[in-house]
Image (cartoon, helix red, strand yellow):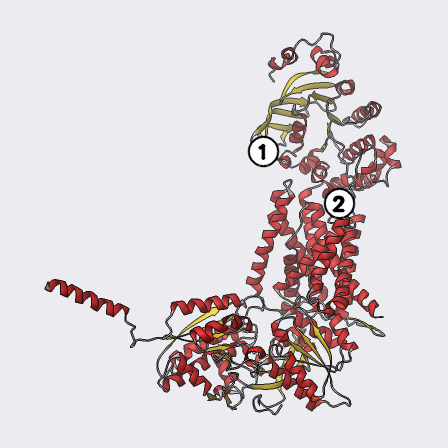
Amino acid sequence: MKTRSHIFIGILTAAITVLAPPTWGREIKVLSQFPMSGPVGTLPEFGMGYIDGMNWINSEGGGVNGKKITFFLEDFRYDPTVEVANFNKYCAEHSREEFLMATGYITGGLKPLIEKVNVEEKIPWLDGSYSTEIFGVEGGPSKYPYYYSLGATYGDQIKVLMKWIKENHKVSGKPRVAMVYSPTAWGKDGLPEGLDYANKLGLEVVAQIEYPYTATDATNESMALRKAKAQYVIYHGYSGATSHTAIFFKTAKKVLKDVQLMGTHYTTGRFPILVCQESYDGYVGVATRPFVDAVPRSQTPMTNPMVKMAHEFAKKYRPNDYAEEGKIKDMFLYMEGLTYALILQEALTRADKAGNLTREGIKKALDEMVWDFKGLFDGKKFDYRFHTVPMVQVFKAQVKMQKVGGKEVPTGAVKPITDWLNVNEIKW
Amino acid sequence: MDILQVVFSGLLVGMVYALLGLGVVLVFKASEAFNFAVGEFLVVGAFLFFILFFDLRFPLLIALPAGLLAAGCFGALVEKLTIQPLLGRNPISMTIITLGLASLLRASVQLVFGAHSYPFVIDLPDITLELGDMLFLSEQLWASILSGLAFGLVILFLFKTRWGVAIRATSESQAKAMAYGINARVILLVVWALSGICIAIAGIMISNFGSLTYLTAMVGFRAIPVVLVGGMDSIGGALVGGLIVGLCEAFVGAYLEPMGLIGFKNIAPYILLLIVLLVRPYGLFGTIRIERV
Amino acid sequence: MLLRVENLRVVYHDVISVLHGVSLGVDEGELLVIIGANGAGKTTLLRTICGMIDFYDGKVVEGDVKLEGHSIRSLHTTEILKKHRLTFVMEDRPVFWYLTVEENLLAAAHARWDNQVAQDMEEVYGYFPVLKRLREKRAGLASGGEQQMLAIGMSLMTKPRVLLLDEPSLGLAPLVTEELFQIIGRLNREKEVTVVLVEQNANAALGIGDRGYVMETGRVVLEGKASELLENEDVREFYLGSGEKERKSYRDARRYKRRKRWL
């Protein structure tokens, strides 16, 4: 009998040891997904910035109050299905107690995950999507409590552009504005809000043109804009790194003389300077990040602390990629990966300090967060109550062709022409 | 006025498509294979020029001929490695080889050049033409002029030189040509080289409209309606087919797409193609076989 | 001997054996006639000699072809044509239908291009005056006889020393055939071209030939002077259809097949 009870106790002990959750050695796990390959282009910069950021956090950056972050990085190839499948996989493989935060990058992946993230898993999800539908007035924290955007919505971006037009319109008569947008959910996002606001400001919207991704030619679109006598053209819903953007700018610049070309976040930056060259000169665009990566890179002003940090990291950890002809074509993307790592650290640290390092605790920390994002917005702080980082700045592109080694090459940068604006504080 | 603008911009782009079609027709006539890798030929050709002109910074007058020569060598190399071993066999096998080749080349281009856009601005003299309300861009005029020139030179070569005669003879029958001592292997190399050059010119011109990425290969699909509308084995057909497809795109883009049919431009040529094939199965200018009773 | 075929065995697609050890010889300047029924391997023999057998997925498994003592078995058609000036005129009027008559002649001259092309073309027009009239016309639209004349004219443009002709009379009217064969005879005599003429029309062919071979199912079964062959009873019976004996049975018809022939 005695032997039997010993065996029984032995089995019980073993079972408890194996099955019970080991509360002491709990890991902190986060998942990030970026579109690093696929139809939008090869954008390994995301991953580089993210990995460098996370490694720095775990070694010198203090971790989560000393604890290390176990981070997972996936390339979802710009495919929402892959993004969703990856997330489901990690949810199944890791416990709720350890898998604390996730990040994504496109609206297409957010939509099918609404139920899963906000109702089933209740996991704080940071996203690169600026979708007005999800983060605007119609959506927001009340509807999607666990979704957080890392920028201002497209609706707000377009409104800021409209406001800029109103304030900077020099010639007489109502400003004549035209929209060119992609036939995608992205291109149509924010459009109604922007147009309503334009009417409110007394701007005249003279044309709305859908311009497809597959274009080899933008003459028709440009001629239509010319016939409509547009003075301001807002180009929205495209990547600045693609062929159709180059086609549009090259054509529009010639057909539409004296017209102010404008655009939203993704057509502002360094890539269009390289691809569109001279035709990009004078472009005015709104962006949610400091887009100051100049061509050549050595001329980038290092006044912004986050920009400085990103450039220093890249120079230190990836000197070959950082060089002018290296893999990092646009430091914005590298900085983007880095900022994701930093905001994950910040949210986790705040929740841990509050003694509640759980998904709920992190949500609470994010909702109450007032932060300067390590100087990303030149020292300005933002609050996360509407689940968007409400900061935008208006930039103007200055591109000059210069002879280097017998060839004309573009030089220049997009330079800020306003301060950082908090869209939550603007009186619309 | 408006309609003239649409017609002429259609014709300008159409000329480039015609040259693209010519590249396919030449190969089809000689090897009886449809080159499905036309889009990849286009990208490779454009990148070869890109390297010479933008990376190595040769002047245009050297870079363009050298780039085209390289594109020609590339075409010949492809023929030598993939098509020649199948000489005298079923052309379907060759067509399928070109399908595989397309995948291989697409992946290789991505591997070497990545997937992002390369800036592509050739500093040709600005000849933008403005007539009243009409406006024709310098890039498109140049594209049309150079494509037309290339098309004309190819035709001269085919019909006025002894090599051209030998190419046309071999295109009709490799066996007969061989029997009369025409080296079909050499001729096929020349044809593929010529085709590579035509496609490369089209690729360079199309890249000059915007920028160059591996996705520029999508333009290659436009060769399908071009050659099928015009007739797979007709050089004149490639010209007419190219212009028709260009016009079709311009009209759909100008008049139908604003009605909300965005992207219809891309499928309109195929619809046209279906109609043409229903009426004339060999295409508009497909060779009417010489039938003897 | 100018051209020697030694014990040639040829197989198509690795399995179909067509020639089972053919040997024959052609003297310089002679007009040799090879007759035989369909499927005897005559065309295969010519394809092998001129080096085109690879193109038809055939293979020489044994034997050799020698021209002036040099083996040409492993050479390409174009090399054989260029170096040894041996030209093969395929059966069924091998002209390029979509080229004009003149372009056809130019195409045939492609391999040997020199400054005598125009002169040679005039010579061809001299032999075939009808071609001169048709020079701007597409060859596909010419009549069968005109096409065959063009084909032979094209072969002349290659400046041949040896000419292999594969059934030039196929599908032609008797009168046209006669005219054609007269010209072939003239070419042989006047231009000293050695001709190997493969024919089903044995009567006409042997009429202009010097010597002849008879082939059956991949073997040479009979050889001799053209005049002798014309007199041969077997030949008369089976190829000329004018034997004096009445055919008794199929076994008899194939009688000479079993005669051994060593060479």
CA separation in Å, label 2 and label 1: 29 Å
Q: Give the residue type at disc 2.
A: Arg
Q: Position of residue B270 (x, y in %)?
A: 71, 57
Q: Secondary structure at mark 1?
A: loop
Q: In the rendered image of this protein, does residue A46 appear above or below residue A200?
A: above
Please state the chain letter of the residue tagged with numbered disc 1 in the rendered image.
Answer: C
Q: Badge 2 is on which residue? A: B168
Q: Give the residue type at disc 1.
A: His
The nearer-to-camera label among 2 and 1 is 1
Q: Which residue is farthest left?
A: A2
Q: Position of residue B228 (x, y in %)?
A: 73, 52
| Residue drawn at point x = 80 percent, y = 35 percent | B292
Question: C185 or A355, which is in the foreground?
Answer: A355
Q: Tell me which corner region of the image, top left, top right, bottom left or bottom right, holds residue C253.
A: top right
Q: Secondary structure at mark 2?
A: helix
| Residue drawn at point x = 58 percent, y = 65 percent | B113
Please state the chain letter of the residue tagged with numbered disc 2 in the rendered image.
Answer: B
Q: Which mark is residue A133?
A: none
Specify whether B175 is left or right of A154: right
Q: Badge 1 is on which residue? A: C13
Quarter of the figure that contains the C terminus of chain B: top right
> Crowding at label 1, few (<14), some or many (≥20) Cα neighbours within 10 Å?
few
| Residue drawn at point x = 58 percent, y = 78 percent | A133
